[in-house]
Image (tube, grey):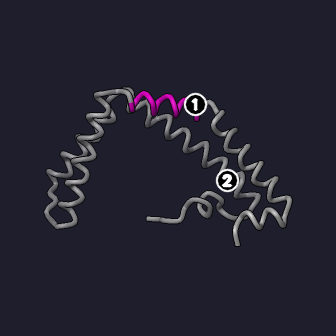
Amino acid sequence: MSIDSDTAADPTGDRVEELATEFGEAITELPVYQRYVEAKEAVENHEEAQEAIQEFEQLREEFQLARQTGRASQEDLRQLQAAQEDLHDIPVMSDYLQVQNELELRLQELNEMVSDELVVDFGQKAGGCCED
C-alpha cells in the first residue's frame, strides 16, 4: 500500500504531511540549525580543516583495515588519535563539532516530544533502520 493511496483515503493524512513539512521547515529556522549550517560551510571552505579531515579519514581507513587483518598496533591507534586531536584543535572544526552537538541535543529533545505523543521512539523508528 503506498502513501499516496493512504492519504487519498484519509484526508487527515494530508494534514499530517503538511504538519511534517512545517515541522521540518521550523527546524531549519532554529538558531542552532542556522549556526550548524554556517559552521559546516566554514569547515567545508577551510583548507587546513579539509586537509586534516582527509588525513584523518585516510588514517582511520588504514587503521580499520589493519584491525580487520589483525595487524593494528598501539602505535597505529596513537597515530589515529593524534590526527583526530589535531583535527579537533583547528578552531573552525571545534566550533563545528560543538554546534553539531548542540543541534543533536535539540533534535533529541524534539524527538522525545514527538515520541511521547506516539508512545514510541519516533526518531528510532522513523530513521533508525540500522543500529550498531
Is residue 77 highlighted in magenta? no
Residue 14 appears in the picture as rendered = yes
Label 2, secondary structure: give it: helix
The tag on residue 112 is 2
Residue furthest out toward the right = 11
Q: Residue at x 61, y 57 (%)?
A: 123
Q: Label 2 amino acid? A: Glu
Q: Quadrant of residue 4?
A: bottom right
Residue furthest out toward the bottom = 1
CB under 8 Å between discs 1 and 2: no
Is residue 36 highlighted in magenta? yes
The tag on residue 34 is 1
Label 1, secondary structure: give it: helix
Up/down of 11 relative to 79, above or below: below
Between disc 1 and disc 2, the foreground one is 1
Q: Quadrant of residue 73?
A: bottom left
Q: Main secondary structure of the magenta part?
A: helix
Residue 86 appears in the picture as rendered = no
Q: Residue at x 54, y 62 (%)?
A: 128
Q: Residue at x 28, y 28 (%)?
A: 48
Which residues are drawn in magenta? 33-44
Crowd around label 1: few <14 · some 14–19 · many ≥20 (10 Å)? some
What is the quadrant of the N terminus in the image? bottom right
Q: Looking at the image, which is closer to me, 124 or 29?
A: 29
Q: Is residue 72 left or right of residue 98?
A: left
Mark 1 or 2 closer to N-term? Answer: 1
Residue 49 placed where, x, y %? Answer: 32, 31
Q: Residue at x 26, y 43 (%)?
A: 56
Residue 109 placed where, x, y %? Answer: 64, 47
